[in-house]
Amino acid sequence: MGIFSRLSDIVNANINSLLDHAEDPEKMVRLMIQEMEDTLVEVRSAAVRTITEKKEIQRRLDQIAAAEADWAEKAEFAISKGRDDLAKGALLAKRKLSETAKQMEGEQKAVEEALARHDEDLARLQAKLAEAKAKEKALTIRMATAKKRVQMRQSYADGRVDDALARFEALHRRIDELEGKAEVFDMGKTKSLEDEFATLEAETGLDAELDALKQRLNK
């Protein structure tokens, strides 16, 4: 495939559509980026050759212009010396150079148009390359997120989370058992005088709070 045919395929490609139908989007976008970067190098190389050609044409045009001026001076000199035959020869040489210059100016115009196309191609290709790299970054982030989700699902699937929860439940039962044992030691014991006063004070506080609530409701 030629460089310009491949370039046309790239800049006209719908990246989203290509990735949607790809079996491996990550691999697909990497291949696209590589293809774009390779094509970018080739387009730039072609642009360098075109610029070189333009400079060569301009240099030859300058040489022709200098030669035309020289033949014009020779024709005038020949006329001043009464040598019309030499003057005609000089004018004929100048005419041939002028025709060559016109032809080369046409080539120069074609080269300038090619350079303008190279500039457009590079801009479009770089835009596509930036789009593809952005897609690659987004795919990388999505892939990393998906892998984490798979790992979490696998953790649930292989029972590791259930095992951890079961261990926590067993720990709670063990704590309940220890607390129960502590409470057993208090069972059957006669309350001390201090305990009796503490209970009485607590009940007194509750009675006062209850009376205040009843008064607010009655109002």
Image (tube, rainbow, N blue to C red):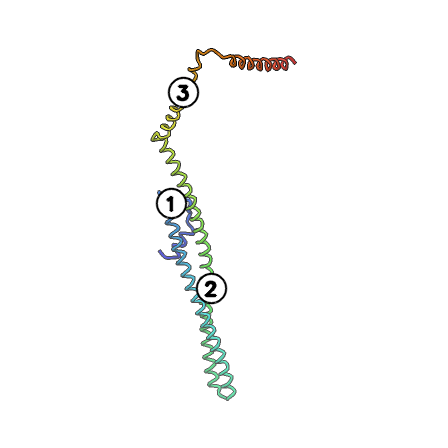
Find the distance from the CA under tag 1 to the CA under tag 3: 56 Å
**What element does badge 3 sit on?**
helix
User: What residue is pinned by disc 3?
Assistant: 178
Q: Position of residue 159 (x, y in %)?
A: 35, 29
Q: Where is residue 155 in the image (x, y as percent from the top left)?
A: 36, 32
**Which one is in front, 59 or 94?**
59
Type of amino acid at the residue the image marks with label 1: Glu
**Which one is in front, 63 or 209?**
209
Q: Which residue lies furthest to the front in this view?
A: 193
User: What residue is pinned by disc 1?
Assistant: 26
Q: Earlier in the sequence, mark 1 or mark 3?
A: 1
Q: Which of marks 2 and 1 is nearer the N terminus?
A: 1
Specify few, some or many for label 1: CA neighbours under 10 Å numbering under 14, 14-19, or 20 or more: some
> Would you identify the image quadrant in which residue 57 lies?
bottom left
Q: In which quarter of the image is the N terminus?
A: bottom left
User: What residue is pinned by disc 2?
Assistant: 112
Find the distance from the CA under tag 2 to the CA under tag 1: 40 Å
Q: Residue furthest left?
A: 158
Find the distance from the CA under tag 3 to the CA under tag 2: 92 Å
Please state which of the two labelled residues, at mark 2 or mark 1, is closer to the viewer. 1
Q: Are marks 1 and 3 in contact (CB under 8 Å)?
A: no
**What element does badge 2 sit on?**
helix
Q: Are marks 3 and 2 in contact (CB under 8 Å)?
A: no
Q: Position of residue 138 (x, y in %)?
A: 43, 44
**What element does badge 1 sit on?**
helix
